[in-house]
Amino acid sequence: MADTADNKNSINVRVLLYFLIALLIPAGILGMGSSIFNAPQNYESRVIDGNWKINYRGRNYINSKLERFESDGIVAGEKVTLETVLPEDIDIYAPSVTFKSRMARVRVFENGSLVYSYGYDIPEGHFVPKSVHYVPLSSSCGGHFLRIELTAADDDAFSSAYPVTLGNTEDLMRHYLQTRRLALLIGIFMFYFGAVLLVLSPFLIIGAAKDKSVLFSAMISHFLGVYILCYNEVIAYIIHNDVISHVLEYMALYFIPSIMILYILTSGSAGARVRVLRILLVFDLSMATLAVVLHATRILMINHMLPIFHAMILTEGIYLIYVLIRCDREARSSRRNYVGMSSERVLLVGIMLFICSIFLEILRYYLMAYVFKTDDSAGIDFITVGALAIVLSIMLNYFFHSIDHLTEARTKVKLYGMAFRDSLTGLDNRASCDQFMTGLDADVMSRYAVVSIDLDGLKIVNDKQGHSIGDMMISGFGELMKDAFSDCELVGRMGGDEFIVIRKDTGREAMESDVRSLIQGTEEANRRGGTFRYAFSYGIADSSEGENVQAVYMLADERMYAMKDEHHRQRGIITPSAMAAESGGGANA
């Protein structure tokens, strides 16, 4: 009953830690991403929404709002012209207008003069990425005529016009970063977490754990970080290269399914469905590589593969959820006394949340494109939330897995102590000694020395003073042996008053030095006085004197008994100094 209560208390602590950690990191990131930390603007800024004249396919829309414009299936080469008069009642230092475009070449005119151009240096038929534009205007731009020309670089390049904001250049750039601060924080967190896992991966892969999943969890974190930062135009803002940022965004998105499957395979979450997942892995890697190759050779732009990947992700996502749930049920059924939340369950929840977030993001993408007919603006999205969920679940999975590993290690040590430790002395018992000698025999090139030791006078102490005193004598002698033979690979008790010591890569001469340490230890203990005095006989042999460990041990045992017989013939106890120089001598104190 006490064990059950302790188990429940341990589970409650783990669940509490799970919720605290799961809430603390997102709360901190969301708090840092809130508008509370926004810096105030130095100058007024204004979104120019109404009073636009929009020209599209020969039709003019007067006093229109940009949010109401729909391109209705624009084709490559078609142009949309947006015209307005800048407000006069706004005083701005270093004014600019900022807006976003998607796969379009852009020209901006102020009072009929070209002040900005984008995408016209890219040849026809090549990829023109999305971009955020900052167009500087004249200092007295109030009342000036502003015209923006958007020329589609691809079919269905855009379906609506993005908002246009007038303000101070520095304020607009600061506001741009502040609105994307949450994505920036999450992306940086994922890069940092992935870097930590990447540093740990060699130790976990090569070490006893043999855990390859840590490498792919690091890759998941890095790829998701790249996607989030590119999707929110943070990378483009930092490197000032929209093409590289846009290609990185799609590459990260296309390779994430493959890395996710690799992680599931190496983490042991696939159960018996390994073969099917390997087939999906080959297919996903082939499709992602094909998309990159087609884009590099300009046969097919990388964004044109998006519908195929959406269909692939939806299909595989449903199957992965099915596989993970089935494997979780099988794992739970195999553990009859399973209670609470395991590290595998935390990982399962994170993966399922991420897959569901992808479903929602794909749904939102097609609703915006074909139902609401508007281009979705950058900001917090479902994949960002799902990415944070899966990275946190991976982190918690390793956290709980470490707790389980430490608990298992302590249990193994305890069980080893019960099976292979002598309860009275703490030395290796006979079973452990036999196992060690068997392993030593397997290494035919090994060199070693064996000492056989017999504790003299134990029977007399047991008969005259009682077995409890005899046990004290054995226990104390065991401590002396630990100190004297601390550099030896095996220090054990074979039973009763018989002990054995084995040291690798040495001969008889080196073992004599350790035996002298034991002699000095017994002399010191005897000088302190007590109810008994320590005395022992010993014999030494090395690997050059026998065919195997057992033969060497038997030779050392014979030499030990020869010394013991000599002690009996003398009918007394002699001092260690009298026998220290003899190779097969004895010691007593």
Image (spheres, grey):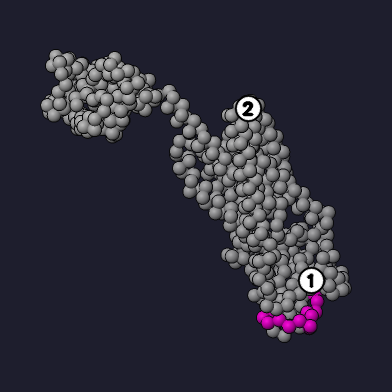
Residue 545 sits in quarter: top left
**Considering the image in quadrants, where does the N terminus appear?**
top right
Residue 110's tag is none
Residue 316 appears left or right of 576: right
Please provide the residue range marked out in magenta.
81-96
Q: x, y percentage for residue 251?
A: 62, 52
Please say if 301 is above or below 65. Answer: above
Helix, strand or loop status at disc 2 = loop
Q: Nearer the viewer, residue 491 or 277?
A: 491
Residue behind mark 2: 337
Residue behind mark 1: 81
Q: Residue furthest bottom?
A: 140
Amino acid under label 1? Answer: Thr
Residue 41 sits in quarter: bottom right
Q: Nearer the viewer, residue 82 or 127?
A: 82
Q: Which of label 2 and label 1 is nearer to you?
A: 2
**Considering the image in quadrants, where does the C terminus appear?**
top left
Residue 506 appears in the picture as rendered: no
